[in-house]
Amino acid sequence: MASMSPPIHDLRQYDETATHFYLDVRCLICRFLGFIFGTETFGNQQQQQFPRKPENMERQSSFSRDFGHAAAETYLITRLTFTLLRYLGVGYRWYTRLVALACYALLLMPGFLQVAYCYFFSSQVRRSIVYGDQPRNRFDLYLPANINGPKPVVVFVTGGAWIIGYKAWGSLLGLQLAERDIIVACVDYRNFPQGTISDMVKDVSQGISFVCNLIDRFGGDPNRIYLMGQSAGAHISACVLLEQAIKESRGESTTWSVSQIKAYFGLSGGYNLFNLVDHFHNRGLYRSIFLSIMEGEESFEQFSPEVRIKDPRNREAASLLPPIKLFHGTSDYSIPSDASINLVEALKGVGAEAEVILYEGKSHTDLFLQDPLRGGKDDLFDHVVSVIHAGDEEALAKDASAPPRKRLVPEILLRLARHISPF
């Protein structure tokens, strides 16, 4: 096991090599799929001597490009993860967790396949909209079936231990909220070692800025935007929100405003790095990796919302924050529920509006995966929707008469998955 963190400049050098490799892999995959589906391009010019393709061929073309993009990025994430583990000298514990993760995913595969089909083939999903100039600066947009007026918008930031996050992880939530006439933008961001925590915060902030300024072009209401994050995504989005409030309180120029965010939903997040570093080390996210992700212990305060909000210099920023609602399972061993409880206490201590809702016996993945895959009534989902639709009598009436959500995975597989989950 590595006894110290690798130098950041070494990881940056490695990242440059990995990025070039990623581009080559993505190019080859896209070209290969292009030959299969007849969409091969040469340089920047697509062959024009053929007449316009039928709609089904255009759909195949779109699928080939999107599949190539997803396959290349998934390959990149997997390769970076294994290379990073070897580079840092990580051994048995991480590999056993990866095996458990593979078994966990296999058990939930019936649901994942149904969601993946909608992700690639539904006309309500707009994939990989570019919001910045970095490789991971893209987001997926989930649209309601009928946009007969401006719709509320949720900007969702996925988790993944800051290492294996990907925008498609939010597809189940996006599809289900879209059924309730809510637009969802799942923002992607650079993971470690492509980037460290400051890069992640920058990416997510830039993605939020894009949504706040341009979502009306997609039928969204720029006056009803909500921010939500899960696990590592909850931590990153909370850092973004607080940083934005601090900048505004100091009169700094910004491209979006905290006032545009009507509420923040944090799901199973950690908000105090000082309390998490030893816990994660014991869980297998070793101190050497964690310190590299968070840019050293000297950066813990800057990226710990619970600690930063207590700074007297940031009291004015606290008054700018939107209502904050945190959700956490009491049987979450990846990030203990105390993380949400402590942040709410800190926020209330400086006069911010905050609430924590605990779910007895729920694990780290129950709230975000198993419960939505189970279908039927879901207290967390219903609570989020009720907050977003508050004051909209027509939307609330539709919610009351909405059919139960479809079950996507048999109960026995959900129970087995919960038993072997590495989270």
Image: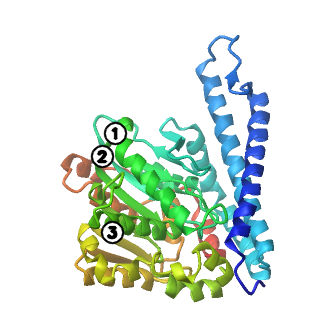
Q: CA distance from mark 3 to mark 1?
A: 27 Å
* Whether label 2 touches label 1, CB < 8 Å: yes
Q: Amino acid at mark 1?
A: Asp
Q: Which residue is mark 2?
A: 222
Q: How is the image coloured?
A: rainbow
For the N terminus, give its image quadrant: bottom right
- Position of residue 129 relative to residue 315, above or below, is above
Mark 3 vs mark 1: which is more N-terminal? Answer: 1
Mark 2 vs mark 3: which is more N-terminal? Answer: 2
For image coordinates 42% across by 47% down, the residue present is 210
Structural crowding at the residue carrying mark 1, measured as other residues with C-alpha within 10 Å and reported as few (<14), some (14–19) or many (≥20): some
Q: Amino acid at mark 3?
A: Ile
Q: Is residue 123 left or right of residue 312?
A: right
- Element under disc 2: strand
- Position of residue 198 relative to residue 225, above or below, is below
Q: Which mark is residue 34?
A: none
Q: Which is closer to the viewer, label 3 or label 1?
A: 3
Q: Which is closer to the viewer, label 2 or label 3?
A: 3
For image coordinates 46% across by 68% down, the residue present is 234
Q: Which mark is residue 216?
A: 1
Mark 2 vs mark 1: which is more N-terminal? Answer: 1
- Element under disc 3: helix
Q: CA distance from mark 2 to mark 3?
A: 22 Å
For image coordinates 34% across by 57% down, the residue present is 226
| Residue 37 visible within the image | yes
